[in-house]
Amino acid sequence: EKGRLLFAGPVDFVKGVVAMPGLPPADRLEVCFAGRSNVGKSSLINALTGRKTLARASNTPGRTQEINYFALGEQRYMVDLPGYGYAEAPLAVVEKWQALLRSYLQGRQTLRRAFVLVDTRHGIKAVDQEILSLLDKSAVTFQVVMTKADKVNAATREANIEQVQAALTKHPAAYPEIVITSSEKGEGIETLRAIIATLE
Ligand code: GTP
Ligand code: MG
């Protein structure tokens, strides 16, 4: 109910940020969405807000290169982070993203939860371990959100949920509950809205 109310209110794109001094004032709680390039971060933000084109989703990996801020009224910020693991990105670009990601995850006081998106078809990959270890060194609780659940059969789904659960046992800052989602079919979206709405 809380989630429904929060997401029924106004949603606005605030700004794209390329460096820490550009972040909006830390005046409300925020959550961020991290994950491999193309895992479905922007699509998930669109599904949560019910706006198909709020966050730019694309077939081209590496589409979102800034930290994009979205406001849920004056209650929350939702933050779309640049995807990582994009093999064709030039090294200098990758290093710049990593530095920004590190400062953001470790230095944003109002960040209450980092959602780490993992493709249900693939489970946690080597590139995801990097962000998990970054999160281990930051003070923020993180939670795995599995994406594109509509694209897998039941057996793969179960196997990869187990793989993620096993991987999380090594990360004390991980929130144990995994959320399985499909931005396409709406699975898990209401659950995630409720989580975002009830954070304190
Ligand atoms: P970057 O910004 O490049 O890091 O990518 P992203 O993580 O924001 O991914 P994005 O939301 O742009 O989605 C990538 C592709 O996956 C798009 O073609 C989406 O339509 C597709 N996609 C995202 N979520 C789902 C889903 O739940 N189901 C299906 N079938 N496709 C999805
Ligand atoms: Mg994106």
Image: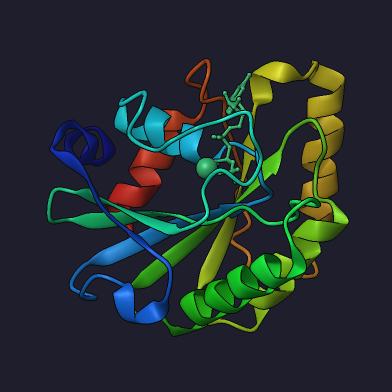
**Is residue 59 in view?**
yes
Q: Measured from the top left, where is residue 21 in percent x and y? A: 33, 81
What residue is rendered at 78% in x and 50% in y?
88
Is 116 in front, or is 81?
81
Q: Nearer the viewer, residue 23 or 145?
A: 23
Residue 10 pos. (x, y %): 13, 38
Image location (x, y in percent) of residue 122? 82, 37
Q: Quadrant of residue 26?
A: bottom left
In this picture, residue 197 sits left or right of residue 127: left
Q: Residue at x 85, y 46 (%)?
A: 163
Give the colour scheme of this rendering. Answer: rainbow
Residue found 85% across the figure and 26% down from its top: 156
Quick check: 119 above or below 117? above
Vertically, is 140 above or below 41? below
* Residue 200 shows up from this direction: no
Q: Is residue 175 above or below residue 195?
A: below
Position of the N terminus, as image quadrant, is top left
| Residue at horizontal 69 percent and vertical 49 percent from the top | 36
Instruction: Locate the C terminus and report the quarter of the image it occupies.
Output: bottom left
